[in-house]
Amino acid sequence: MAVEPQHDLLVRHFVTWAEKKQRDPDRDLLGELLHLREVYDDLEPTYWPSGSVEHLLLERWPSKSQLARPEPDAVVETLDAFVRFLRSTGRMSARSAAPAELAKEARRAASRMAQASADPANWSPTKVLIDFGRQIGIDLDDAPDEQTLQARLDEITATWNALPQEERRRRMPMPGDDADEDLSEEQRAMRRFGVDDGLIALLLTYNGRLPEGELPAAEEVAPYFRDSPFLQQVLALARWVGEGREITATRVLRPAIARQAYDDLGLGAWQRGQLERYYCDERWAGVAAVGRETWIQRELDRPWRSAGECDELHRLWLGAVGCGLIALEGKRAIARLEEDPTPERWIELGVRAGVATLDGHLGKRHYTPVRLVRAMLESYVNKCGPVSKAEVAEWSVRWSDWPSDIAYFTEHGMDLVERQGPSVNEAFGLLGDTGLYVESDDSLALTPAGDVFVTAWLDYMEG
C-alpha cells in the first residue's frame, strides 16, 4: 500500500534514519499500519500509548486490512524501528509508552496475528463481503472507476443477501455465537441488529421509543446556545484566528501557534474540571501517594507536541471548524465570523459545533462519551426528564462487561458500579458547558436546546 500524503514526509524521514542505523523496516507495511490507526482509531502517528500495538495487530488489522498477512519478523522490525525513530528524534508524544515496552507488545502480538487474521469472527462485515466477492469471482481491487466499483459492490451484496441466513451467519459470525448466555449487552445488541459498531447498536435499541411532535421554538432554544461558555469560547477562538493562522498537514494549528492560543485565551479551566471529575477522591494508589491536587497539576503540566493532544483547545477547534466559524483553506485557518446571528443561526452554530465535538470524542475515546450518549438518549425519550448517574453507571457495567466477569468480580468483593463513577462524572463533563443539559450532583436532564440537539444528532448519525 502506498503511504498516504499526510504520512509521507514522516515516513521518508524514518526510512532515511533506518538506513543510517542499518535497520530494515517494511515501508508499505508501516503505511498500512498508520492508515489503520488514523482512520479507525483517530491516533496520530507519533502517539503510541500502552496497549495500542496489541490492539492494532490483533483487532484492527484482522478486522479492517485487505492486505496479505505480513511475516511476524517484518512486523516486529518495522514497529520497533519506527517507535525508536520517534523517540530518538524527539517526535514521540510524551504520553506514549516506552519503545522497549512497545517492542515487547509487537513481539507478543505478531506471533498471534496470523491466527487472528484468519478467523472470520474478527473481520468487519465489509471485509467479509469483499472476501466473499473474491470467492464468487468479483474483485474490487481492479475496478477502473467508481461507477464500476459500485456496480460490483451491488452485485456482491445481492448475491450475499440471497444466501440462506444460516450460511450468512456461518460466514459472518458475530461476537458470542458460541456462548449465547455470556454476552455483554453491547454484544447482544450488535448481534441482534447485525452491526459491528456498538454505538450504532445502542441507537438501534431506541427504535420505537423516540419522541414525536414539534420541537421547542427557536426563541426559547437560542439563548441556551448563545450564552453557553462553550460557544462563547468557540467564538473567542475564531476571533483569535482572525485573518489567518498556520495549520499542519493533520488540519490543526501548528504547535507553537496552538500554545500561543492556549495562553492568550486562558484555556485550562475545562481540562482541570475534567481531571477533578475523574480523580474525585484519592482512592487510586498513585493519587493517594502524592495527593489529589499534585496529581491533577502533573496531568495538566504534561507536554503535548500536537494541538490535537491538548484536550481543551482541540474540543474548541472541533466545534469551531464543525460549525464553520473557522475555515481551513490550504495551509491556513481563517475565521468566518458574522454579525448579529438570528435565533435560528445561533441554534445552527450550537448544534453543528456540538455534533462535531461529540463526534470527535466518540471517535477517539469511544467508551467514555458513550455513557453521556446513553444519558442524553434516556432523557430525550423521557421528555427531558432527569437520568441518574447511578443508573448510567449500572448500565455501563452491563453494556460493556460479560455476565461471567460481573459475577466473578462481584463474588470477590469488587463494586463494578462504584468503579464506574469517575468515568460517568468525566463523561457528563464533556458537553457540560454547552447548554444542552443541566447537571445536578446525581443526575442529568436535557434542556430545550438538548432536545433540539439530540434530534439533530440522530439525523446526522442516520445520514
Image (spheres, grey):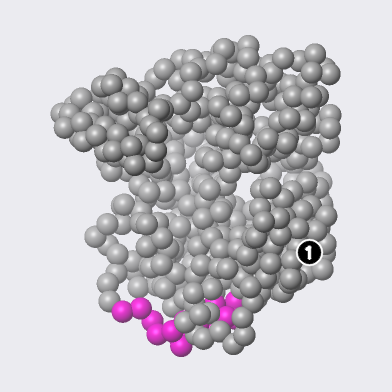
Q: Is residue 245 left or right of residue 176?
A: right
Say which element carries label 1: helix
Does 107 appear in magenta? no
Q: In terms of image quadrants, where is residue 209?
A: bottom left
Q: Residue 266's x, y, as percent?
A: 79, 68
**Mark 1 lies on residue:** 261
On the rendered image, what quadrant is the C terminus found in?
bottom left
Around disc 1, counting alpha carbons within 10 Å, would you say few (fewer than 14), some (14 to 19), or many (20 or more)? Answer: some
Q: Amino acid at mark 1?
A: Ala
Examine the rendering and report whether any part of residue 188 can be seen: no
> Where is residue 8 shown, x and y percent of the image?
68, 35
Task: Please report the residue visible at 54 percent of the width from the left and 73 percent of the height from the top.
Answer: 349
Residue 250 seen:
yes
127 or 399, nearer to the observer: 127
What's the residue at 78%, 64% (across, down)? 261
Q: Nearer the viewer, residue 376 or 150?
A: 150
Q: Residue furthest front?
A: 144
At x 59%, y 87%, the residue is: 340
Viewer-nearest residue: 5 or 302: 5
> Measured from the top left, where is residue 314 in percent x and y?
67, 57
Chief SS of the magenta region: helix
Image location of residue 225, percent across then percent down: 54, 77
* Residue 225 is inside the magenta segment: yes
Q: Quadrant of the N terminus?
A: top right
Q: Which residues are magenta?
A: 214-228
